Image (spheres, grey):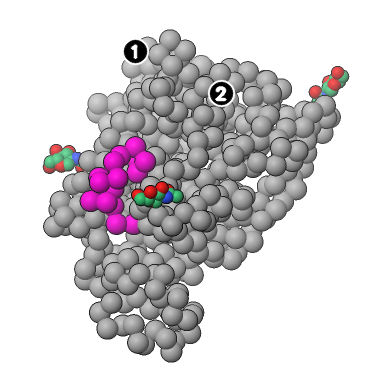
């Protein structure tokens, strides 16, 4: 406890939160981004068939000599002829023969700079101001002594792909978990064997929980000090049903979300983020209300049929549903969830006469603007009584799903938590002394 304990008792809670001093004893830290949170590169092969003249091989003009170019994020996709090219190239296909997802024919993809934070600072390094992602968080980490490549690492991945239930291959997602595992080991070795802190945003948290539970308890205890999950959608979101039904512009100023709807429907990780019946477990609570039917989290397969996307039913039922219906297995690595709250979040969607091509009327509830509160708090619900699992939840009122990476108060909470972890003062001890 390094002699700090006496002082704590006389200080107010607010100060105690940030009381752990910055220290030079740093556990290495790995950042895991959310969906769309890192760059992706593509290259077109001879098999590539453009869907129209604009999407020909010349687009985009700027490529490396070996043909690689940045697929995500490229600002030209906001111009509508190119939005379609982008969507065609981002599309995934489920292949029944191999029971796995793959890229569009003729499109090779890769994630640049695995291991480094380089491709998750900005989505487009030429447009730093408008595409900054983890850059403000990284600045805060550098202030307490973290150094890129020495104590600070990044695990970017192809966020279109997910993971599947046991017995189903998921080549891209499993390769990522394998590289990620080696990165954890390397980061620890580089730092004298200190176990690492994993800091995820959004979808990244779901991958981290799988990484932990797919490795042995002795591996976890040796290599992982703590897992901090920011804005993790443990049980999916109602908003994801909107994305599947009507498309979602993801904050990019696209004229028409229907242009990207097919691409968004094709993504495997998007299936993973649909509301899980385990978490949205009130059977009679409709999440989507349409003219002729309503759908709870138990009715996702019917929902796919009715929105005109029946080809999702099989992969959803076979690969995704058994994965999300599993009990959340406690990895017995200490976890802190930091979440936004009190931001209007889609809770139910009402579709009128025009069906699913129109944007719905939305009824809002509590959450972080994207993820519903019930999903943000799912681990707490699940593990509240599990004495083997240390879990702490920090709510930051008024902070949204992505502003948690930029908001001053949220960053203070994140850095405060990391300082506590590094100074080995148990956060539980700090709280119990108030
Ligand atoms: C881990 O370190 C080894 C040996 O230096 C290197 O070959 C490998 O590429 C590294 N892997 C990762 C994921 O960092
Ligand atoms: C609802 O059902 C009626 C009668 O079957 C049909 O005419 C109508 O097109 C349906 N509406 C929608 C939005 O699917
Ligand atoms: C906690 O750990 C003990 C000892 O390993 C085990 O027997 C017990 O079943 C665990 N409890 C839970 C809720 O997982």
Which element type, helix, strand or loop, lies under badge 1? loop
Q: Residue at x 71, y 37 (%)?
A: 283
The reply to whether residue 423 is in sight is yes
| Magenta range | 211-228
Which is more toward the observer, 59 or 222? 222
Badge number at residue 46: 1
Q: Residue at x 35, y 69 (%)?
A: 426
User: Which class describes the residues within 10 Å of circle 2: few (<14), some (14-19), or many (20+)?
Assistant: few
Where 185 falls versus 6 (above or below)? above
Q: What's the CA distance linking mark 2 and mark 1?
A: 34 Å
Which is more toward the observer, 302 or 369? 302
Say if disc 2 is inside 8 Å of ligand 2: no
Q: Nearer the viewer, mark 2 or mark 1?
A: 2
Q: Position of residue 422 (x, y in %)?
A: 28, 67
The reply to whether residue 124 is in sight is no
Q: Residue at x 26, y 54 (%)?
A: 196
Which element type, helix, strand or loop, lies under badge 2? helix
Badge number at residue 317: 2
The N terminus: image quadrant: bottom left
Q: Position of residue 372 (x, y in %)?
A: 62, 50
Number of numbered callouts drawn: 2
- Identify the image quadrant of residue 129: bottom left
């Amino acid at each position: 406890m390094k002699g700090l304990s006496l002082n704590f008792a006389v200080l107010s809670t607010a100060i105690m939160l940030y009381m752990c001093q910055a220290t030079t004893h740093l556990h290495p830290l790995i950042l895991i981004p959310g969906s769309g949170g890192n760059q992706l590169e593509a290259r077109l092969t001879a098999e590539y068939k453009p869907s129209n003249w604009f999407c020909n091989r010349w687009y985009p003009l700027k490529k490396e000599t070996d043909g690689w170019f940045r697929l995500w994020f490229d600002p030209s996709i906001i111009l509508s002829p190119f939005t379609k090219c982008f969507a065609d190239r981002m599309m995934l296909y489920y292949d029944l023969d191999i029971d796995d997802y793959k890229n569009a024919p003729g499109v090779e993809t890769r994630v640049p700079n695995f291991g480094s934070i380089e491709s998750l600072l900005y989505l487009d390094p030429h447009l730093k101001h408008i595409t900054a992602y983890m850059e403000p968080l990284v600045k805060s980490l550098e202030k307490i002594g973290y150094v890129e490549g020495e104590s600070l690492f990044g695990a970017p991945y192809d966020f279109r792909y997910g993971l599947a239930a046991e017995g189903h291959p998921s080549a891209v997602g499993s390769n990522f978990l394998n590289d990620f595992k080696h990165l954890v080991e390397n980061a620890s070795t580089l730092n004298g064997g200190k176990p690492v802190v994993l800091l995820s945003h959004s979808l990244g948290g779901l991958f981290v929980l799988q990484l932990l539970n797919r490795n042995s308890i002795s591996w976890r205890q040796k290599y992982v000090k703590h897992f901090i999950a920011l804005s993790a959608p443990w049980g999916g979101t109602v908003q994801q049903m909107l994305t599947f039904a009507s498309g979602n512009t993801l904050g990019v100023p696209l004229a028409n979300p229907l242009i990207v709807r097919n691409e968004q429907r094709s993504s495997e990780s998007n299936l993973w983020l649909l509301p899980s019946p385990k978490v949205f477990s009130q059977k009679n609570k409709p999440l989507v209300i349409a003219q002729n039917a309503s759908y709870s989290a138990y009715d996702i397969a019917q929902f796919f049929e009715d929105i005109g996307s029946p080809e999702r039913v099989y992969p959803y039922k076979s690969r995704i549903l058994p994965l999300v219906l599993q009990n959340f297995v406690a990895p017995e690595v200490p976890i802190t969830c930091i979440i936004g709250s009190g931001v209007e979040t889609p809770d139910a969607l009402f579709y009128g006469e025009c069906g699913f091509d129109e944007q719905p009327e939305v009824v809002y509830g509590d959450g972080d603007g994207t993820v519903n509160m019930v999903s943000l708090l799912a681990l707490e619900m699940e593990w509240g009584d599990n004495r083997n699992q240390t879990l702490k939840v920090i709510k930051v009122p008024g902070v949204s799903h992505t502003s948690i990476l930029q908001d001053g108060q949220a960053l203070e909470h994140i850095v405060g938590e990391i300082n506590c972890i590094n100074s080995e003062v148990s956060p539980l001890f700090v709280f119990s002394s108030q």
